[in-house]
């Protein structure tokens, strides 16, 4: 096995005080250093999720072999008797939490719709036995969960949203994250990733996580340059199919899951470099032309139609929106604006629905809705942590946006007609429209409801 050394370069000297502003880790305390015990265990989908599975985890640098055991799950404890051993790749990563080894195994030869148990190796120890179910080979109804930005105060505030979502949809097959999982504003801060996995808990170990990048997964390593670089934890922790265009295979990809084609685009690269917007559009058109799935869901970070004040992403509308319309993309799941908003493009006539664009936020950082969005989108929301549950059926997508306390804020059904067109049937909200309740006038005048650094260890 080849051991790749990946040494993170820091653009800033990060103080413990800065970290404490965005995590529950006090200055000078080591909370998320790698140990002999496997952590950050996460499932991510392959291009063939009925027959294969990516599994990633982290240990201290003494563990040099990526090794796991897997067997069909049974009702008794004798899992080790039938377990098959798989090996994979290991890479070293140096961060402010020291040197760690990140491990990746691609498990192949699996049977569709089958429950498997697995455990991953640490230093002279193993993780607990965990379970996952492979996808069906063909279309079968299922549910998935969609989160907007988590980003700030992950353990303190995002954790309850992630847990509430799974209590609402305990049989969800996927969890989709539309970028800005962490903040990374002041450098490559590993405690933030530690808190993301802490907040996600065992859910990430047993349910596939479909993760796209946001601008806060990028850092400016060279103060003299405007260029930004993907944080090294992202590709080390999340394996993706690698079917995207060069050089974006770590972040641009598609997955076919039980009759739905999920497509992840990289809006950060597209907005930093027009050539990357064009490249993704060319790749996207091929993926949509070849698409045989019943439903198509696209995710990326920056909204096609901005909801919060002072933002606009015209380049995405120029390169990507025409393709969504031409090929009948059903849902577009976005983040970035730290508010909630729904926008529906028109279909072939006024009685038909085109693509439904959603923007949501799961973490505590909150902005204000622009006047244009208030006029053009319904519903919108400020100051509201949300998660979304999407139920996929043969001829209907049923969508629910729920608050952190489980109250229904938005709902609709996208119904497929016999001729292939779609009709949107709105549901009924159980919550009155929500707007900012923070009395801090200075924050509101800055276009924010809650600042990201308002929620730390010292709150």
Image (cartoon, helix red, strand yellow):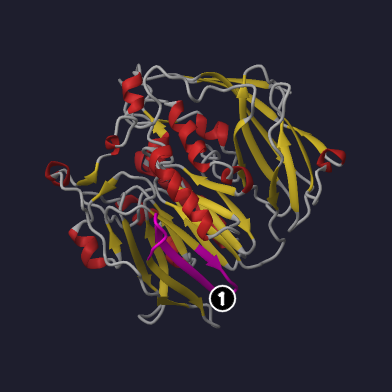
Residue at (35% x, 32% y) in the render: 22
Figure quadrant of residue 260: bottom right
**Horizontal arrangement in the rendering, residue 124 relative to residue 299 (left or right):** right
Give percent across and percent down for residue 77.
80, 43
Horizontal side of 214 relative to 43 (left or right) equals left
What residue do we see at 20% from left, 48% from top? 438
Q: Nearer the viewer, residue 196 or 284?
A: 196
Magenta-colored stretch includes residue 399: yes
Residue drawn 48% across and 66% down? 330
Q: Considering the image in quadrants, where does the C terminus appear?
A: top left
Residue sitting nearer the eye, 35 or 444: 35
Give the answer, above or below, for where 424 lies relative to 295: below
Which residue is at the far right?
81
Q: Main secondary structure of the magenta part?
A: strand
The residue at which mark 1 appears reads as: 395
Q: Which residues are magenta?
A: 390-408
- Measuring 32% from the left and 60% from the top, which residue is drawn there? 341
- The percent position of residue 88, horizontal first and vertical second, equals 72, 31
Crowding around mark 1 (Cα neighbors within 10 Å: few <14, some 14 to 19, many 20+) is some
- Horizontal and vertical percent position of residue 207: 61, 49
Provide the secondary structure element on which disc 1 rests: loop
Name the quadrant of the N terminus: top right
């Amino acid at each position: 096995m080849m051991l790749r050394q990946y040494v993170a370069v820091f653009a800033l000297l990060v103080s413990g005080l800065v970290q404490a502003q965005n995590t529950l880790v006090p200055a000078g305390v080591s909370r998320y250093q790698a140990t002999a015990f496997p952590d950050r265990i996460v499932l991510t989908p392959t291009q063939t999720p009925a027959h294969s599975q990516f599994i990633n985890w982290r240990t201290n640098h003494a563990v040099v072999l990526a090794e796991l055991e897997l067997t069909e799950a049974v009702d008794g404890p004798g899992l080790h008797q039938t377990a098959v051993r798989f090996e994979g790749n290991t890479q070293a990563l140096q961060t402010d939490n020291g040197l760690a080894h990140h491990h990746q195994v691609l498990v192949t030869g699996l049977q569709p719709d089958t429950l498997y148990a697995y455990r991953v190796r640490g230093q002279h120890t193993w993780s607990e036995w965990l379970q996952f179910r492979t996808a069906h080979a063909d279309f079968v109804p299922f549910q998935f969960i969609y989160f907007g930005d988590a980003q700030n105060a992950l353990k303190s505030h995002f954790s309850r949203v992630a847990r509430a979502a799974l209590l609402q949809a305990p049989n969800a097959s996927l969890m989709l994250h539309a970028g800005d999982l962490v903040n990374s504003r002041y450098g490559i801060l590993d405690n933030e990733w530690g808190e993301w996995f802490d907040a996600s808990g065992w859910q990430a170990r047993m349910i596939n996580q479909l993760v796209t990048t946001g601008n806060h997964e990028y850092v400016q390593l060279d103060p003299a340059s405007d260029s930004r670089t993907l944080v090294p934890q992202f590709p080390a922790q999340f394996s993706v199919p690698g079917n995207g265009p060069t050089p974006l295979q770590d972040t641009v990809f598609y997955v076919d899951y039980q009759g739905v084609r999920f497509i992840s685009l990289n809006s950060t690269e597209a907005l930093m470099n027009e050539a990357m917007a064009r490249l993704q559009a060319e790749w996207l058109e091929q993926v949509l032309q070849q698409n045989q799935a019943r439903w198509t869901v696209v995710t990326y970070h920056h909204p096609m139609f901005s909801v919060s004040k002072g933002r606009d992403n015209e380049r995405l509308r120029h390169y990507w929106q025409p393709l969504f319309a031409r090929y009948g993309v059903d849902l577009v799941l976005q983040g970035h604006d730290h508010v909630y908003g729904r926008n529906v493009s028109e279909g072939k006539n006024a009685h038909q629905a085109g693509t439904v664009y959603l923007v949501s936020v799961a973490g505590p950082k909150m902005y204000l809705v622009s006047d244009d969005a208030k006029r053009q989108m319904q519903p919108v929301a400020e100051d509201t942590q949300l998660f979304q549950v999407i139920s996929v059926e043969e001829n209907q997508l049923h969508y629910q946006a729920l608050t952190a306390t489980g109250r229904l804020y938005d709902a609709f059904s996208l119904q497929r007609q016999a001729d292939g067109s779609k009709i949107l049937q709105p549901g009924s909200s159980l919550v009155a429209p929500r707007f900012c309740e923070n009395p801090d006038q200075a924050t509101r005048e800055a276009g924010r409801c809650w600042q990201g650094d308002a929620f730390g260890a010292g709150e």
